[in-house]
């Protein structure tokens, strides 16, 4: 994943496109970039990162620990306003909520997403780790497949794929050649295309950046997120991430997805669960 001119944290396309500008206390202006769209909507992980950044500006603690988002209506590229509220502040943790609004044709505001987040300082966490989970078994990155290795799986915008460096494990790309495994699993190596290393805010994007597991269940099309909760467990080490996403139950037109994200030091750096609507195709 080495880049000729690697972007750095704080000076990258991701940082610019998730930036928020303080208008007044608790109110931030933002611009949703068309560069993070997939099919016909702005990616939910990108939106979560932007809202996470706004909460980081509003709260006294720097790092997201747990962020839960309800996606109310589909967001589109263009201007937006984010309103934040501090719910509670403590010595080690603070909690706030934020909502992102866009404008309807008649000028009225439409709420797109509502987020509740708890923040702290990742650098202050204990080194005591007791875990039974292990990094996912994946093929070496040079044996994995990216978007350019096969036909476009679905119609519509794929602008976000130009900003991501994703290499999928061969055992989870059957859907791309018309032979889905039926297992509801997606695994791959992940990074930003400009080489920017991961940080807590980009991890909010990472958990929702791989193709949906519904593809490996034989369904293609938009899989809109209804609710997404993400836990950031530690600050990631430089280098590519490994992402494993699974679903165990698609029923009633909805499915859950559980994601684990591992860094180059074999540490579990982020976890998430989301409820999504299954594609209608």
Image (cartoon, rainbow, N blue to C red):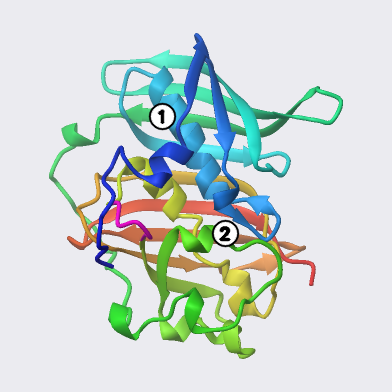
Q: Is residue 231 visible?
A: no
- The secondary structure that dominates the magenta segment is loop
Q: Is residue 266 left or right of residue 31?
A: left
Q: Nearer the viewer, mark 2 or mark 1?
A: 2
The x and y percentages for residue 129 are 17, 51
The x and y percentages for residue 175 are 60, 83
> In this view, which residue lies farthest toward the top?
25
3 over 15 or under it: above or below: below
- Magenta residues (range): 192-196
Which one is earlier in the sequence, the residue at label 2 or at label 1?
A: 1
Q: Quick one: label 1, few (<14), some, or many (20+) residues within 10 Å? A: many
> In this view, which residue lies farthest toward the right?
106
Disc 1 secondary structure class = strand
Quarter of image, res 16: top left
On residue 118, the disc is 1
The x and y percentages for residue 276 are 65, 56
> In this view, which residue lies farthest toward the left?
127
Q: Is residue 250 magenta?
A: no
Q: Is residue 224 visible?
A: yes
User: Residue, x 33% and y 17% (percent of image)?
Assistant: 60
Q: Is residue 63 left or right of residue 44?
A: left
User: Residue, x 46% and y 26% (percent of image)?
Assistant: 54
User: Residue, x 33% and y 79% (percent of image)?
Assistant: 138
């Amino acid at each position: 994943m080495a880049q000729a001119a690697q972007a750095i944290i704080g000076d990258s396309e991701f940082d610019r496109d998730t930036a928020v500008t303080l208008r007044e206390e608790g109110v931030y202006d933002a611009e949703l970039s068309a560069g993070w769209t997939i099919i016909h909507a702005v990616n939910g992980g990108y939106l979560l990162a932007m809202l996470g950044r706004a909460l980081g500006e509003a709260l006294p603690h720097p790092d997201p620990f747990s962020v839960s988002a309800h996606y109310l209506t589909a967001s589109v590229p263009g201007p937006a306003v984010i309103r934040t509220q501090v719910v509670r502040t403590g010595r080690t943790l603070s909690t706030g909520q934020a909502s992102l609004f866009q404008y309807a044709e008649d000028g009225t505001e439409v709420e797109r997403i509502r987020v509740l987040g708890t923040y702290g300082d990742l650098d202050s966490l204990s080194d005591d780790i007791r875990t039974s989970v292990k990094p996912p078994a994946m093929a070496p990155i040079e044996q994995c497949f990216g978007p350019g290795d096969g036909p476009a799986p679905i119609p519509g915008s794929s602008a976000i794929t130009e900003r991501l460096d994703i290499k999928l494990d061969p055992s989870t790309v059957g859907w791309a050649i018309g032979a889905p495994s039926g297992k509801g699993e997606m695994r791959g190596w992940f990074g930003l295309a400009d080489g920017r290393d991961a940080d807590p805010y980009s991890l909010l994007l990472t958990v929702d950046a791989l193709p949906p597991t519904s593809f490996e269940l034989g369904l293609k099309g938009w899989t809109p997120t209804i609710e997404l909760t993400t836990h950031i467990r530690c600050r990631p080490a430089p280098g590519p991430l490994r992402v494993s996403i699974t679903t165990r139950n698609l029923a009633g037109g909805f499915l859950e997805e559980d994601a684990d994200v591992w860094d180059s030091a074999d540490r579990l750096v982020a976890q998430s669960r989301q409820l999504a609507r299954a594609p209608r195709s």
